[in-house]
Image (cartoon, rainbow, N blue to C red):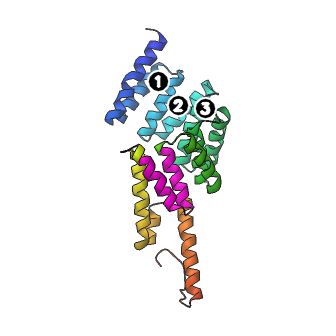
Amino acid sequence: QTTRQRVQEAQAEPAILPDANAHKDAFDLLADAVTKLPNVPDLLYDHAMAAEKVDRLDVLETSLRKLIELRPDHAHAYNALGYTLADRTDRLQEAHDLIGQALKLAPDDPFIQDSMGWVLYRLGRLDEGRAYLERAFKLRPDPEIAAHLGEVLWAQGQRDEAARIWRSTLQEHPGNETLQAVIKKFTQWAGAFADDLRRWLDTRPPFGIALDVLVRAGHGLAGAHRAGLVHGDFKPDN
């Protein structure tokens, strides 16, 4: 067998397995393949993506950093690592730098623009993040980009527009798990105002949304003071 044939064979079975939710099996198969063929860029990338599915972010990072060493022009390696750090860790500045490098290599890629929008949102830079996400969504109305754009719009108080984008994209992609999850999450959070703010904060909503809620609560408290309904303190239980 040639090296190319061995790579194609190594990729074939794991490519089928995720459809059956066999993420662990796919990860194990690709780990074995990378051990045998350690310097093949496509295998390293597939291994990293499989590692993300089983929450092995350490393996994802190792594989993607090795891929970047082998292929410093691989925009999607920078993007995948940067997005994962932005979405799953607090290493936001590092994520921003990685995605920035990806953008330099592929400035018109909507998925990389989406990643930049997401990390800017996570950094609290909502206007900048929204601009990237709107450009990305215009180029590629993908469900994950729609989920991200809607979340930023929601954080900015434009909830009707967020819901419109989610609904229209879901009509085009019925059954999409990413969109269904984000719609469910924000429906639950919206309902939390009738319950206990502390329990809502315990769900660890994104910083921008939590800040928006607390600012609005502060304005409400100020109004109560002006009306003579004075409350002595301001904390979630109140």
Task: Nearest to the eye among marks 3 and 2: give it.
Answer: 3
Residue at 42% x, 68% y: name it: 192
Q: Residue furthest left?
A: 20
Label 1 vs 2, first from the N-terminus: 1
| Residue that label 3 marks | 75
Q: Tell me if residue 181 is in the magenta stretch.
A: no
| Residue that label 1 marks | 34
Q: Amino acid at mark 3?
A: Ala
Label 3 vs 2, first from the N-terminus: 2
Tell me the distance, in whole angstroms, between the alpha carbons under discs 1 and 2. 9 Å
- Can residue 92 be seen by looking at this rendering? yes
Q: Is residue 49 above or below residue 4?
A: below
Q: Is residue 193 above or below residue 181?
A: below
Question: Callout 1 environment at 10 Å: few (<14), some (14 to 19), or many (20+)?
Answer: many
Residue at 57% x, 48% y: name it: 118
* Kind of element beneath mark 3: helix
Residue 208, image x, y percentages: 57, 60
Tell me the distance, in whole angstroms, between the alpha carbons under discs 3 and 2. 15 Å
Q: Amino acid at mark 2?
A: Ser
Q: Is most of the magenta stretch helix, strand or loop?
A: helix
Residue at 55% x, 55% y: name it: 152
Residue 79 position by quadrant = top right
Residue at 48% x, 12% y: name it: 3
Tell me the distance, in whole angstroms, between the alpha carbons under discs 1 and 3. 21 Å
| Residue that label 2 marks | 63
Q: Is residue 126 above or below residue 31?
A: below
Q: Which residues are magenta?
A: 144-170
Q: Amino acid at mark 1?
A: Val
The quadrant of the picture occupied by the N terminus is: top left
